[in-house]
Image: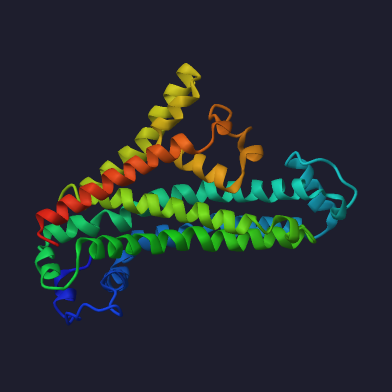
């Protein structure tokens, strides 16, 4: 839920100083309500199911070296007599395959959780006249915007970062001796997840600022994400022109993630129509444009609400 007027009326207005961070205060109190509700909690906890299933699978694979080598061979990385013979690039690709399978699942959970947490953030404030309370506090539009952004990003980062750490940790457990050559997967994955969560959060805030109904904002979100994905898939199949993947919000995110983590050798077979070798520039332009538009929508709404 968004931060309600009743909660903010209890807060003392702190003086503006270098030690005061209104955005963090908004985020801290907003997070208390962001994941309330049975359905939100089901989605939040359910998002860890793929990581748990994959971790158990990796645990059973790691019971003996023969199972590990069979697993590596099934992923198309070659046949080897021992784990020590697996080249560094093949070990990286094996772990990248595991990471890609996990991120594909977590991405859809993030798509579902984003409107549940983000759609009410501004829409509910407009409906409950909470802007009147914000106006009584020494905050700017950017304080409000950043605070709301952090409210949405926290659960998104939670459902993406923690599963990645768990699954990659398990994967490194059965590919012993490969950490030195594959540790860069962690910072790459975290950078990709940060971009993913930030873009999702900014876009849903822009949509939430368009009206006073969180349900309306949720519908628009699924049109932007799932609807564009379906349209792009149809156009790609009909024309075989990979430029149409830019129509899909999710395809653009996938392209950025794939290039940040260097998953191109892994996903070429999974997404044969997407032009993976084109690079992330076009997708970044599309996502950057959406973020700028969303930020403008939020600032326009806040300006109308007379926030400085």
Quarter of the image where one finds residue 129:
bottom left
Residue positioned 75% across, 46% down in the render: 89
Q: Position of residue 260 (x, y in %)?
A: 55, 47
Relative to 90, say whether 307 is above or below. Answer: below
Q: Is residue 286 left or right of residue 131?
A: right
Residue 215 in sight in this render: no
Which of the image's four quarters has the C terminus?
A: bottom left
Residue positioned 12% across, 64% down in the render: 131
Colour convention of the picture: rainbow
Which of the image's four quarters has the N terminus?
A: bottom left
Q: Is residue 116 left or right of residue 167?
A: left
Q: For this rendering, which residue is in front, 234 or 137? A: 137
Q: Is residue 1 left or right of residue 130?
A: right
Q: Which residue is outermost to the front? A: 18
Q: Which residue is outermost to the right? A: 81
Number of numbered discs present?
0
Relative to 251, say whether 46 is above or below. Answer: below
Q: Position of residue 25 (x, y in %)?
A: 28, 74
Q: For this rendering, which residue is in front, 222 or 239? A: 239
Residue 164 in sight in this render: yes
Residue positioned 58% across, 28% down in the render: 272
Q: Position of residue 116 (x, y in %)?
A: 32, 55
Residue positioned 86% across, 55% down in the render: 84
Q: Position of residue 2 (x, y in %)?
A: 23, 63
């Amino acid at each position: 839920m968004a931060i309600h007027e009743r909660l903010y009326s209890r807060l003392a207005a702190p003086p503006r100083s270098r030690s005061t961070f209104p955005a963090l205060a908004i985020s801290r109190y907003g997070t208390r309500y962001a994941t309330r509700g049975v359905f939100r909690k089901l989605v939040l906890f359910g998002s860890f199911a793929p990581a748990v299933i994959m971790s158990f699978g990796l645990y059973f694979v790691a019971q003996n070296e023969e199972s590990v080598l069979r697993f590596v061979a099934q992923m198309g990385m070659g046949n080897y007599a021992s784990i020590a013979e697996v080249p560094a690039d093949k070990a990286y690709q094996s772990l990248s395959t595991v990471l890609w399978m996990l991120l594909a699942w977590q991405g859809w959970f993030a798509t579902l959780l984003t409107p549940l947490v983000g759609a009410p953030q501004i829409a509910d404030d407009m409906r409950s006249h909470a802007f009147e309370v914000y106006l009584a506090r020494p905050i700017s539009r950017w304080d409000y915007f950043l605070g709301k952004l952090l409210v949405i990003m926290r659960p998104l980062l939670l459902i993406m970062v923690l599963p990645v750490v768990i699954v990659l940790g398990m994967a490194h457990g059965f590919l012993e001796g490969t950490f030195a050559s594959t540790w860069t997967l962690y910072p790459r994955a975290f950078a990709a997840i940060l971009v993913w969560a930030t873009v999702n959060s900014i876009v849903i805030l822009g949509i939430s600022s368009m009206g006073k109904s969180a349900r309306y904002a949720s519908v628009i979100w699924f049109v932007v994400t799932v609807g564009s994905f379906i349209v792009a898939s149809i156009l790609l199949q009909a024309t075989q022109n990979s430029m149409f993947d830019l129509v899909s919000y999710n395809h653009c995110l996938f392209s950025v993630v794939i290039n940040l983590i260097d998953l191109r050798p892994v996903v070429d077979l999974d997404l044969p129509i997407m032009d993976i070798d084109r690079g992330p520039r076009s997708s970044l332009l599309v996502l950057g444009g959406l973020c700028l538009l969303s930020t403008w929508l939020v600032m326009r709404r806040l300006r109308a609400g007379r926030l400085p």
